[in-house]
Image (cartoon, rainbow, N blue to C red):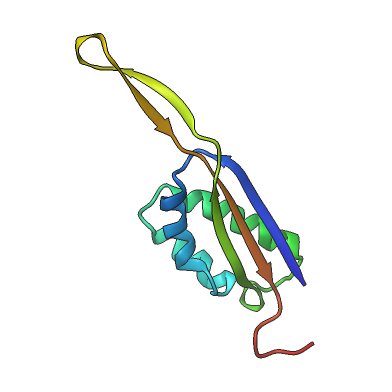
Amino acid sequence: MESIAKAKYARYSPRKVGQVLGLIRGKTVANAYGVLPTVPRAAALLVFKTLKSAYSNLNVADPHKAMVKQAWVDSGPVLKRVMPMAMGGRGIVKRKTCHVTIVVTDEFKGNKK
């Protein structure tokens, strides 16, 4: 059985979130819970909350029996802001957003149910 959790329109760069997702992809949920608090990125909190939501949607009592099957990030809409520059000019600042998706399953590759 699988469960999916999504976090949409998060104010993080997709590249930085993707680096955090690469650390938990393919691991058990218990191992991912242990890894994420030690990651020195602000996006680790977003990934932790999304993983917690996906795991709670699965309704499995033991986090050692669930694993992160897939985890990916897509880019969301870009917020364009103006910053004043020299001699009355302006510069465009792009505030990036992302959509995080995490799929958790209770079926391991070796097990057949």
Q: Quadrant of the N terminus?
A: bottom right
Q: Quadrant of residue 80?
A: top left
Q: Which residue is drawn at 41% across and 32% down?
A: 94
- Compared with 79, 89 (above or below) is above
Instruction: Check the image and name the residue furthest to the left.
Output: 87
Residue 93: x and y in percent read: 37, 28
Q: Quadrant of the C terminus?
A: bottom right
Q: Residue at x 76, y 65 (%)?
A: 59
Pick whichever, 99 or 85, lies toward us: 85
Pick whichever, 17 or 81, lies toward us: 81
- Compared with 75, 22 (above or below) is below
Residue 10: x and y in percent read: 54, 41
Residue 8: x and y in percent read: 62, 43
Please state the total of marks drawn on the protein image.
0
Q: Residue at x 41, y 51 (%)?
A: 16
Q: Residue at x 49, y 50 (%)?
A: 45
Q: Is residue 47 left or right of residue 81?
A: right
Instruction: Check the image and name the residue furthest to the top.
Output: 88
Residue 102: x and y in percent read: 62, 60
